[in-house]
Amino acid sequence: MALQSINPTETKTWAKLKVHFETIKDQHMKTWFAENPGRADEFTIQWDDFYVDFSKNRINSETMTLFKELAEELQLKDAISKYFEGDVINHTEGRAVLHTALRAPEDTNVLVDGENVMPEIYKAKTLIKNFSEAIINGTKKGYTNKAFTDIVNIGIGGSDLGPAMVVDSLAFYGNHLTPHFVSNVDGDHVNEVLKTLNPETTLFVIVSKTFTTQETLSNANTIREWFLNYATQDDVAKHFVAVSTNTAKVQAFGIEPSNIFPMWDWVGGRFSLWSAVGLSISLSVGYENFEALLEGAHKMDTHFKEEEFETNIPTVLAFLSIWYNNFFKAESEAVIPYTQYLNQFATYLQQAIMESNGKSIDRSGKQVDYQTGNLVWGEPGTNSQHAFFQLIHQGTKLIPADFIGFTKSLHGNKDHQDKLISNFFAQTEALLNGKTEAEVQTEGTSAEIVPFKVFEGNKPTNTIFIKQLTPESLGKLIAMYEHKIFVQGVVWNVFSYDQFGVELGKQLATKILDEINTGSVTNHDASTINLLRHYKKNS
Ligand code: F6P
């Protein structure tokens, strides 16, 4: 097995962290800020165009020292080398995990089964480049010889969330092509999208690593049927392309071999936006910007691989998250981007984080007796301030939060940007300091109402402040979270790169669909039988 199996809770450092936790769990961060004027500098990492201030956390220097000791005891450095070098760290599926190779320079040597994968990666990049350019500049046309105006990505999970999030996040850099995403097997989704489209000028990109996913194939079939109402079978070749590892199934669907973009089993679905799965990104913002996204991710890869513990952004964020999850027993963490462009970021992270580390069996095959994967959620600020911030400020749950902001806006409206950033700073300050009873009293609040207006503060936040939202900085940001996931998986001693947890529901849905089609309901619990009957009567 490439990665060792070490129960983190049985390490010497974990025992020390438990003792340390008892000494600081009731202390208030604002006292530490008052006592130590150097605290903000001590706990800030400045790297490239990233300014990461993690000083508003329930930690002190000793916590950081112990985190580092834990990383050493769990041999994190060795795990990082194995991750980048293509060792079979996805042990349960017998695969390497090499999304980092997708953004590495061409002269890197990354071996899978003794063969360097870089030539294949760069061949695929050339295909993506040539194809995107031909669609964007109109040299490739539709069946009535018109240039394309719309592109539809048909996929689900990692074959949808990553590309959809990036396309949305980089809308500022978008060209004349209008992107659409169809994912849900709910026919209302595909029909809503279809009603806006002209078959003569729409390109369909079917993305499915396996090409067996029910949702994607159902949507692809529905769309092809719709297309054939207007065009002929021969025209399909001009309007449908696919990204998959399963070329046989793609060809059986009727897609020409020259319209198939490759995928590899050493790239996990939720980490695949850097491959041809990102074709809709390259089409929407141009290949140059897609390349810049990859370059940004590669810079973060190098940072993660080479930086020492104290200044290693993904590693520090991972340990902070473990601190709250396993010691403070926080149930979730929030990600709040202060840009509307990152509207889909938390949704994207939900798959990346929860499909990766939502595991309860350790690397020895035993049930864990400690908490693993975090629940992650969030919405852009300032909208979220008017939605769920009440609970973060005054609720009973501890919710550590990442605040992501940009020093420069894209449209350059200074008035709006200053207001946005004032809120960005104000929230983390309020979460840190809270408001005491005495402060509320001095505002002239009546004694009866005072308790309701007190904020205890001491709520942890990370401020991830980036120069500007560009393809490159977005690449860095996504890669930062990918590596945070990796570190957490190493510490929690789980296999982060399989996803068996999604299989059971899929199997049962196939069985139930068969029963709905044949009308013969078999062995189910009483609740499911009633639901099936209710559906039959009312559908
Ligand atoms: O949800 C399970 C899953 O296997 C994801 O990991 C993957 O991103 C998604 O389904 C889609 O799979 P495919 O690309 O093979 O259609």
Image (cartoon, rainbow, N blue to C red):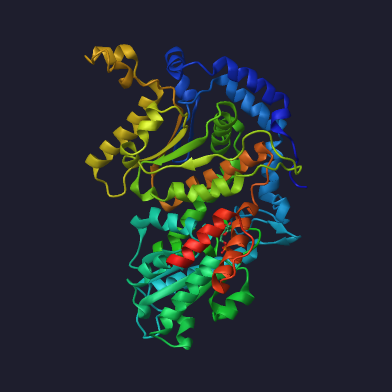
User: What is the x, y in percent for residue 98?
Assistant: 64, 54
Question: Taking 112 as reference, is 514 left or right?
Answer: left
- Please identify the quarter of the rendering in which residue 112 is found: bottom right
Count of numbered circles on the image: 0
Is 520 or 257 nearer to us in this picture?
520
Compared to residue 444, the image places residue 114 above or below, namely below
Specify the quadrant that holds the C terminus.
Answer: bottom left
Left or right: 169 as drawn, with respect to 503: left
Residue 451 appears anywhere in the view: yes
The x and y percentages for residue 270 are 56, 54
Q: Residue at x 51, y 16 (%)?
A: 26
Question: Relative to 41, does residue 126 appear above or below in the rendering?
Answer: below
On the image, the x and y values in percent for residue 493 come to 69, 39
Q: Quadrant of ligand 1?
A: bottom right
Quadrant in the picture for residue 119: bottom right
The answer to whether residue 272 of the structure is visible from this angle is no
The spot of residue 474 in percent (x, y) is 45, 49
- Quick one: 20 or 478, which is closer to the camera? 20
Depth check, front residue: 192 or 34: 192
- Answer above or below: position of 533 versus 298: below
Q: Residue at x 64, y 21 (%)?
A: 18
